[in-house]
Amino acid sequence: MTPRRRQCSAWPGEERQRQRWQRQPGRLGKRLAFLTAGIIASTAVAAVPGHTAGAAPREAEPTPAPAPSAPQSPQDSPTPQTPPVPSTPPVPSTPPVPPAPDTPHVPAIGAYLDYGPLGVDRMAELSKWLDGTELRVGHTYLPGDLWSNIEGTPRFLESWAAWRKAKADRLFVLNVPMLERNEDGVSDEEVRGLLRQGAAGDFDEHFRVLAKRLVDLGVPDTVVVPGWEMNGTTYTHRCGPDPESWKTYWKRIVTVMRSVPGQKFTFDFTPNRGRDAIPWTRCYPGDDVVDIIGMDSYDQPNGMTFDQQVDEEYGLRHHVDFAKAHKKPISYPEWGLFRNGDNDEYMRRMLKWMDEHKPLYNTLTDYCPHGVWQCKDNPKSTKVYREALSGLPVNPTPKPTEPARPPHCSPLDLGDWVEYWLGGKLCLRFDWWERRERPRS
């Protein structure tokens, strides 16, 4: 995959960079026992299943989001001095992956529409275009030019945090560059040195700042995608110049971000589809620091069929099988049209592939040449996408399940105070007087 990725090294990073600069980024218990014993002694009583004694504990009140921070100018911040740390830090236990915010009929879908607040606004517009289908995945990228931006300039993250918190079943996906000057064509030799600095802990503090900002903004469950497309040649955070240092550096980033109190981050390892500059399996840092195994998969190179995209070395099938072997969910943070133009066959087959393999989430890249809503150059693919995803039902709020009542049981009204301490209603079996004959031997 190396030659074709080099041909398109400006996509989609260059377009995202161009978009970025267009905007600013006791006693009662004894009495109860006596009362209960009296009831049981006088009648045949059966407790309703599904209740436990005592009242259910109340959930803690949510912590209010902090007030918006003042805008920060995009100036570089010097690398803070950090105490010496071992070259390979201990890795804390992996947090559980949040359940996929989808149901069999409501996939967790979204689209990349713009970096900042404009992208948030366009989410509602795209949902309207899809006849009300809810976009429950918001996806954006931190600018990789300066460390101060990789730390998550507060003004940049505020709109996305507000969008995420508006509904409980939403996912916020944030691509995080691992190095500054991330799209500046830095040489392999310099990348190798920077990766070794990262592996030694020189950049830890930047990711600690980012993690704390996300927690303080009320989005501690962000899906973090560090160093995406690491098997390619586009980005400074690429893996090829030194895979071992890259993996150690990834472990440090995850360790540092997990060390921040209140965090519930999920970490998504996302290479390009195919071999590219280096097999992406050589960059995999380990199951203890990866929660999701993603893949960016565009319709390329020229003339490649969807079946070939599935079966190529390190392609779509390898991705699914690899994730299954490592007991990880999959995702598609970036996908869309590309080298083969308005390819409705690709659109149809990719949607079917995701329907079959149930990724945790997927986000279409929606600007030209990849998109179907903001790009008018792909009418056939647009029709397929819209027909497939329009009018999907809104994810329903689950209703509390009523406990099952035993057969031949009439609930007793003992009052709220008694039911509170019993943990539910009691019911009187009205067939207690029945004489049931035992079968004769």
Image (tube, rainbow, N blue to C red):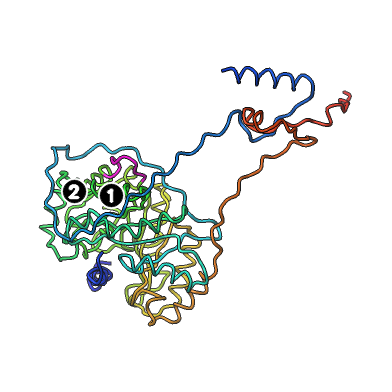
Q: Please state which of the two labelled residues, at mark 1 or mark 2, is closer to the viewer.
A: 1
| Separation of marks 1 and 2 at Cα, in angstroms | 27 Å
Q: Which quarter of the image is occupied by the C terminus?
A: top right
Left or right: 102 in relation to 160:
right
- For image coordinates 32% across by 47% down, the residue present is 215
Classify mark 2: residues with Cα within 10 Å, few (<14), some (14-19) or many (20+): many
Say which of 275 and 202 sits in front: 202
Pointer 1: what residue?
A: 213
Disc 2 element:
helix
Whether the magenta-drawn stretch holds residue 325 is answered as no
Pointer 2: what residue?
A: 245
Question: Magenta region's main secondary structure?
Answer: loop
Say which of 22 and 280 sits in front: 22
Relative vertical location of residue 4 with respect to residue 293 in this rendering, above or below: below
- Magenta range is 257-264
- For image coordinates 14% across by 46% down, the residue present is 202
Image position, residue 280 (x, y; %)? 29, 56
Image position, residue 36 (x, y; %)? 70, 22
Amino acid type shown at disc 1: Arg
Asked whether residue 4 appears in the rendered view, the answer is: no
Asked whether residue 184 appears in the rendered view, the answer is: yes
Image position, residue 72 (x, y; %)? 20, 58
Amino acid type shown at disc 2: Ser
Disc 1 element:
helix
Say which of 425 and 356 sits in front: 425
